[in-house]
Structure formats: C-alpha cells, structure tokens
Amino acid sequence: MKNILITGGAGFIGSNLALKLIAKNYNVTVLDSLSPQIHGDYPEVTSPLYNSIKDKVRFVKGSVTSRKDWLEVLKDQECVVHLAAETGTGQSMYEIQRYVDINIGGTALLLDILANTKHSVKKVVVAESRAIYGEGRYYSEDLKQYVYPVERQDEDMSSGDFEVKYPGCTSPLKLVGTTEDSLIHPTSVYGITKQVQGQLVHLVCSSLNIASVSFRYQNVYGPGQSLSNPYTGILSIFSTQIKNGNAINIFEDGKETRDFVYIDDVVDATILGIEKEKANGHAFNVGTGIATNVVTVTQELMKNYGVEVPVHISGNYRLGDIRHNYADMSKIEKLLGFKPKVSFSEGIKNFTLWVNTQQVQVDRYSESIEEMKEKGLYK
C-alpha cells in the first residue's frame, strides 16, 4: 500500500503521522476541517500543524460528515487512517449532537461509501481512545478477582472521597493495567462515540473483506499539540496557565492518574498497524504502561519552565471524569513488537522546550470551566 488517506491529518497525531509516512515514501492525502478550536481563528495562516504538512500532502479542507468530501478524497486510496473526531470528555457532555454527528456519523458515512461504491481501500485504521474503558481495571483482595468500578457518584466526591468503589469490597482496590479485553464502559459521550467508531469499523470492514485495526490511544502529548484548546490536553492547559503566570487549579486531590504517551511513540505504533498484517482485526492499547498523577505533571512542568505559579489542590471535580487508568501494553508488544521509547521526563523536556519557542496563548481555561458550571458538570 502506497496511497494513504488520513482524516484529521492536520491535527496533532495526524500531521506527525503524515510527515513520517512521507519520509517513508508513502503518498499521503489529508482531509481536515481545520477546526478553529484546535488550529486557531486563522488556521491557514497561523496553525503550525497545518503549515507543517500543507506543501507535502494532497490537502482537502472538508468534513467527514460530507459524502462529497469523502468521495473526493477516497479515490485511489489503499488505506484510510481515520483520526478525525471531536475530542474532550467534558465538552462532549453538553455538545452531544456535534460529537455524535462527527465521530459516529462521519465513521458511518465512510463505511457506507465503502459498502456501496467501487474503491481500492484495503485497510481502515481507526482511533479509539482510552476513554472507552471508563474507570480502569482493578484487583479486589476481598473478592480475589479483577473488577471494573462504575462511575463515581456526586455525593461521594462532594465530601472529598474521590476513590472508586465496588460492591462487596471494603479493602482498597488495587489499580492494574487495563487490557484490551477489559470491560468497555465509557463514562462520557466522547467515550461512547469512540467505542462505537471502533465497533463499526471492525464489524463492517470484516463483512467487506477489508482489514481493520483500532488503536486505543492514552493521553498523547508532545511538541506541536494545540496550546489554544481549553477543553482537552492537561499539559497544554497547564502550560498556557504557567506561561501567563496564572494559578493552576488541580481537581480532586491531585492523585488522579493518567498514562501519558509521547507523540513519536504513538506515530510509530500507528505505522506498525498500517504495515503489519498481524495487526489486522485487532484493537491495541497505545500508552506507556505507567500511571502518572496530576501533581507530578504540574511539578515537572514548572521545573522545566523554571517558573513557579500558585497551585491549588481545590477538591473541585467534573462529573464524568475518571479517577485512574493506565494501559497494559502486553498485546501490542507481543503481536507488533512495539515498546514506547520516550520516558515521561524526556518527553516533558522536549515538550516544554518546544512551548518556549511558541507565542504565549490567551488562557481561556476559565471560560471552559464556566461552560461546565452552567451545565452542572463542574462542582
């Protein structure tokens, strides 16, 4: 396969993937709407992600919700890497139709075209998300088994009790890595849309004799990610606050954890999914297998910037947020030979060095918080 279409190819993951594929002599077409939320108000001029690829790919500005745009970009393509999506768990809880229309509707439209028109597509690679798992996987000493806690309750968190619970368990649950066969139980509209995207692609592609691969990306970060999007990306949000000299409000007790995976590792894993037949028909976690808490993230950022700002561990929380989740990486290592190469400390250093070269963005995080307050999602 030499002709590859990347939807959302001007985004953070997509643009980095495009550049590496071009270096490997692939012919890359990109479909992207250049959303102002990600790329700024004048993306054709000011978006570094778009500008990094615009002269190197065949670029089509359009939407995955447009049949006309799909038909234009699918011509002669052998592989579709479907990354285009609305992202952000909090925002998805009140912009429900937009998330469903773009994430699920756009995927359904692609598959409808593949099922009903002549094409040359041999493989579809789709981005799922760690959000499909909801809360992570735990081991209960009381029950002597793995358990999957449900969404945390408002009444518990309002009293400062942020840890997960499971019926019949009195001892603290032990967090373990989430495997690909773990329970799928998303706690946000975004997570539901990513679950459905993956299910649709695997189901329909199998019936059409098209190979399918899905990747459950953890928290992807690195040079080039949007610094202006206040709805997603904790490293970007905190960096913008630090660069503006603003205080950082850490939710809950700061002990909540995520699996932060560097962009270069994500691109390498995705290319393995494109190139290796062993990937076909499978879903893979893409992370580091290491849980890092939010307090550590804040300290590492301030240390690397050489800037101290007030940090408030406030006890505030967002309904729908998960407490913990990190990836079990056994499957992708066994089947595809993938191991992440970039440590969190090295990745943060690279990220902050890049941020120091960028124009300081306006801190719009408080605006996003006000939106969530209005919807009753922020406490």
Image (cartoon, grey):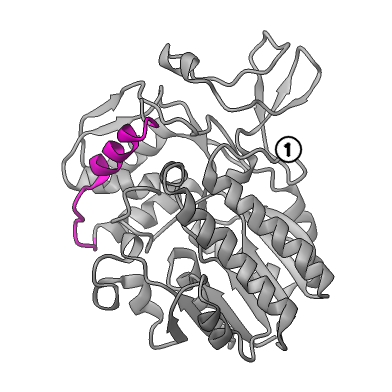
Image quadrant occupied by the C terminus: top left
Q: Residue furthest top?
A: 170
Residue 211 placement (x, y as % from top left): 78, 72
Q: Which amino acid does label 1 sit on?
A: Leu
**Residue at left 73%, top 55%?**
333
* Extreme residue toward the bottom, this view: 76
From the viewer's perspective, tell me whether residue 247 is left or right of residue 104: left
Task: Kindly identify the residue that appears in the image at 37 percent across and 52 percent down.
Answer: 349
Residue 131 visible from this viewpoint: yes
What percent of the width, then of the height, locates residue 30? 49, 80
Relative to 126, does residue 9 appear above or below in the rendering? below
Whether 32 is among the magenta residues is no
User: Among all residues in the image, which is located at the extreme left?
Assistant: 245
Whole-percent x, y for residue 340 in the image: 60, 55
Number of residues whose C-alpha sits closer than 10 Å to that of mark 1, classed few (under 14), some (14–19) or many (20 or more):
some
The residue depicted at 46 percent of the width and 42 percent of the height is 93
Q: Is 375 one of the magenta-colored residues? A: yes
Q: Which residue is drawn at 49% across and 14% down?
A: 156
Instruction: Determine the image quadrant of residue 198.
Output: bottom right
Circle 1 sits on which residue?
183
Can the viewer see residue 130?
no
